[in-house]
Image (cartoon, rainbow, N blue to C red):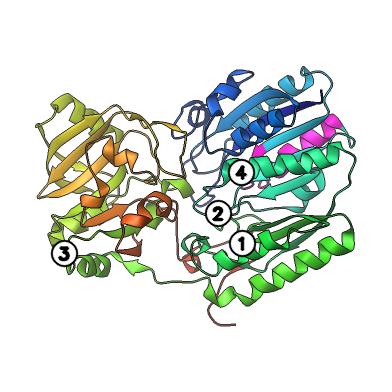
């Protein structure tokens, strides 16, 4: 039985965020399991929509012996501290070296991990793994849809495979696809790669695979996998990482180099031609609220995507400016989630249901009021939507607060609002809200899209900047996608 070591190391680093990523962020659980080592990794990820879970299931189905080493993930935020990266590497290295003879390695990586020292953390992880194992043992990794793929990553790995969906409903499936390539390598079939980097950056809201142009581009990538073309990935990239290899790329694997190159270049040309489509309307808060208010009382749900405060892209999910504006404009039908404010959550639990908190909630332009505690929760519940499928949430103490009819759901740990179970945990049915403000960019569409009569992408406060022209890139030389060619 062939022996395959597996591990997951996940972080999406927003280099424009001032919030460093510490070991505490990796240790604590949130939507995904906290830091886990050894055999416990298998139980931690089992049944979840995670690449590692899909890979393990595929390996076991293929009769291979799985050796779990490490699971480490942290919510997107600022640069990972060097000491944390080295500590995680030391855990992985020790486990790898003590695992005994290996036939292959599967890694569940993100592809946009940045540390204080390494702007290509995933590339450095792969480089070190290759240095330990030599050139003969295949190393295959799955990468996030938003991976900033580098030549170091491509050259250090035997194969890399990316998600096809945003919202990422195919993470487990991608892990299984990566194992398919690993099995080909184990059978002695060589893979030839072709790698193309595109010259522009794509803002996160317009990377959604449910809308054009990404919908047809991902379909083209999938359809290209035929015959001797074994894998084709289009990575839209993570534009909030100011790194040299930040931005979209194409990676193809085939049974010969010419075929790989032809395939990658053909898809790259389609992406280049689609550049003018990578843009959409960003609503200002006042105009979005005014527009939404016109439609209240009609039994519909309008969703305002608070994209700039999206915890899933490194923001704090704590900006209360949009709440403050909603109070000023008189929006009693408005429900906001999820505001990360541990002090307010604790105060609500101390006051109890029915209690009133006279305080300003959130950060930035705080929202002041006499907030009544409507309901309380532990923050521990099972996710029910397709993105977080199979995950056990742990968001710390939670509370549902209300003032002047406006409702705010508060958590103690940040997590983007991408699952209706977050609301139901506090007794709130999302489809009963007339104006639903979600601190998320795209992932919410997987579970909330069906209840929305309309979706407005709103540019409010936060580190998850949607208008890339506002950012001052110092390292990345690619320009934001433009409507004008």
How far apart are the alpha carbons under marks 4 and 3? 40 Å
Instruction: Please name the residue shown 56% across and 38% down the image.
Output: 50
Instruction: Please name the residue shown 82% across and 36% down the image.
Output: 130
Give the x, y percent position of residue 449. Answer: 37, 56
Counting other residues with Cα less than 10 Å from the Cα at mark 1, is it few (<14), some (14-19), or many (20 or more)? many
Q: Which residue is mark 1?
A: 218
Closer to us: 171 or 339: 171
How far apart are the alpha carbons under marks 2 and 1? 8 Å
Let me know if residue 128 is in the magenta part. Answer: yes
Q: Is residue 163 visible from the viewing direction of this image?
A: yes
Counting other residues with Cα less than 10 Å from the Cα at mark 4, is it few (<14), some (14-19), or many (20 or more)? many
Q: In which quarter of the view is residue 401 placed?
A: top left
Q: Upstream in the sequence, badge 2 or badge 1? A: 2
Q: Are marks 4 and 2 in contact (CB under 8 Å)?
A: no
Closer to us: 25 or 364: 25
Q: Are marks 4 and 3 in contact (CB under 8 Å)?
A: no
Where does the magenta region start and end? 108-133
Instruction: Please name the residue shown 50% across and 52% down the image.
Output: 16
Q: Are marks 2 and 1 in contact (CB under 8 Å)?
A: yes
How far apart are the alpha carbons under marks 2 and 3? 33 Å
**Secondary structure type for disc 1:** helix
Instruction: Give the number of the mark in front: 4 or 2.
Output: 4
Q: Upstream in the sequence, badge 1 or badge 3? A: 1
Q: Which residue is mark 4?
A: 173
Q: Are marks 4 and 1 in contact (CB under 8 Å)?
A: no
Give the x, y percent position of residue 335. Answer: 22, 50
Q: Is residue 318 left or right of residue 120?
A: left
How far apart are the alpha carbons under marks 1 and 3? 36 Å
On residue 298, the disc is: 3
Q: Height in image: 302 above or below 29?
A: below
């Amino acid at each position: 039985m062939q022996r395959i070591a597996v591990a997951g190391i996940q972080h999406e680093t927003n280099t424009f965020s001032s919030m460093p990523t510490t070991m505490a962020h990796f240790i604590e659980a949130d939507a995904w399991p906290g830091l886990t080592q050894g055999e416990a990794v298998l139980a931690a990820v089992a049944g979840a929509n995670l690449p590692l879970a899909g890979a393990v299931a595929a390996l076991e189905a293929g009769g291979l012996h799985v050796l779990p080493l490490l699971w480490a993930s942290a919510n997107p935020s600022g640069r990972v501290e060097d000491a944390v990266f080295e500590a995680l590497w030391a855990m992985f290295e020790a486990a790898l070296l003590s695992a005994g003879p290996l036939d292959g390695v599967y890694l569940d990586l993100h592809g946009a991990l940045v540390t204080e020292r390494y702007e290509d953390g995933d590339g450095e992880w792969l480089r070190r793994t290759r240095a330990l194992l030599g050139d003969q043992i295949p190393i295959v990794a799955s990468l996030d849809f938003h991976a900033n793929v580098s030549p170091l990553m491509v050259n250090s790995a035997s194969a890399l495979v990316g998600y096809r969906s945003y919202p990422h409903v195919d993470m487990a499936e991608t892990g299984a696809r990566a194992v398919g390539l690993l099995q080909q390598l184990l059978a002695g079939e060589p893979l030839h790669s072709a790698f193309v980097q595109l010259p522009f950056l794509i803002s996160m809201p317009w990377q959604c695979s449910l809308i054009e142009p990404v919908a047809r581009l991902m379909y083209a990538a999938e359809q290209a996998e035929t015959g001797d073309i074994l894998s084709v990935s289009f990575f839209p990239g993570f534009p909030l990482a100011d790194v040299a290899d930040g931005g979209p790329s194409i990676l193809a694997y085939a049974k010969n180099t010419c075929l790989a190159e032809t395939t990658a270049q053909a898809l790259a040309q389609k992406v280049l031609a689609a550049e003018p489509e990578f843009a959409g309307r960003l609503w200002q808060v006042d105009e979005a609220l005014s527009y939404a208010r016109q439609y209240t009382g009609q039994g519909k749900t309008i969703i305002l995507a608070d994209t700039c405060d999206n915890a899933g892209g490194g923001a704090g999910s704590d900006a209360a400016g949009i709440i403050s504006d909603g109070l000023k404009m008189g929006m009693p039908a408005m429900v906001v989630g999820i505001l990360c404010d541990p002090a307010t959550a604790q105060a609500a639990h101390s006051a109890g249901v029915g209690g009133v908190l006279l305080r300003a909630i959130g950060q930035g332009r705080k929202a002041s009021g006499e907030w009544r505690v409507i309901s309380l929760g532990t923050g521990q519940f099972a996710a029910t939507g397709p993105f977080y499928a199979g995950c056990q949430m742990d968001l710390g103490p939670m509370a549902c607060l209300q003032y002047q009819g406006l409702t705010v759901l508060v958590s103690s740990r940040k997590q983007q609002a991408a699952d209706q179970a977050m609301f139901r945990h506090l007794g709130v049915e999302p489809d009963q809200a007339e104006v639903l403000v979600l601190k998320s960019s795209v992932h919410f569409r997987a579970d909330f899209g069906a209840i929305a009569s309309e979706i407005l992408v709103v540019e409010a406060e936060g580190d998850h900047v949607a208008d890339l022209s506002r950012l001052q890139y110092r390292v990345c030389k690619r320009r934001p996608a433009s409507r004008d060619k």
